[in-house]
Image: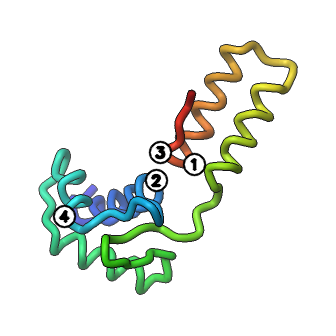
Amino acid sequence: METKKFLIVLILRILETDSSKENPYTQVRIANEISKAYPCDRKTVGRNIKFLMELKFPIVKTKKGFYMDGKTFSLSEIDFVKTAIMGAEGKSTEEKDELVKKLTSLMSKKYDMS
C-alpha cells in the first residue's frame, strides 16, 4: 500500500484508539508515533486530519490537540461488558480472559485490563 494512503489510516487509528477528551494528541505526537514505522511530519498529519474532518469524522480540535469524539463505548460501558463476560457461564476463565482482551483492544487502548 502507498505510504501516503496508509498514513491517513494510521492517523485515524491513533485518534480512535489512543486519544480522548482528557488526552488529546497533538500533530507532533501523532507524527512521532507514526515515524516509528513510516516517515511522517507534523504538517502531513495536519493535512490528513483536516481531510478527515472534511469527511465528517468526529474529530475535535482543542488548544491541547485533537481527539475523536463520539467513541462507541465509554470506559464504564467497557467495564460493564468485561464484568458480564467474566460472570457468564459456558467458557473457562482462560477463554473469558482472552475474549475480554480481544474486545477491549477493539474498544480502547487505554482501558486497564486488570
Viewer-nearest of labels 3 and 1? 3
Left of 28 or right of it: where is 15?
A: right
Per the model, the C-alpha gap separating discs 1 and 4 is 24 Å
Q: Is residue 113 above or below residue 80?
A: above
| Residue at 58 percent of width and 34 percent of height | 102
Q: At numbered mark 4, what does the secondary structure look like: helix, strand or loop?
A: helix
Q: Nearer the N terminus, badge 2 or badge 1?
A: 2
Horizontally, residue 51 falls left or right of residue 92, namely left
Residue 17 position in % (x across, y down)? 46, 53
Q: Residue at x 52, y 48 (%)?
A: 108
Q: Where in the figure is residue 91, as x and y percent of width and height?
A: 79, 18
Identify the residue position indicated by label 3 in the image. Answer: 110
**Amino acid of disc 2:** Thr
Quick check: 101 above or below 96? below
Tell me the kind of residue under disc 1. Answer: Met
Image quadrant containing the N terminus: bottom left
Secondary structure, mark 2, is helix
**What secondary structure is marked by label 3?**
loop
Badge 1 density bin: few <14, some 14–19, many ≥20, Cα 10 Å: some
Q: Is residue 40 above or below residue 59?
A: above
Contact between marks 4 and 3 (CB within 8 A): the answer is no
Q: Tell me which label, 4 or 2, sits earlier in the chain.
A: 2
Question: Which of the 4 image quadrants contains residue 62?
Answer: bottom left
Picture coordinates of residue 45 (x, y %)?
23, 70
Q: Which residue is mark 4?
A: 28
Percent of width and height locating residue 80? 75, 42
Q: Which residue is mark 2?
A: 17
Q: CA distance from mark 4 to mark 2?
A: 17 Å
**Distance from label 2 to label 3 (Cα)?**
8 Å
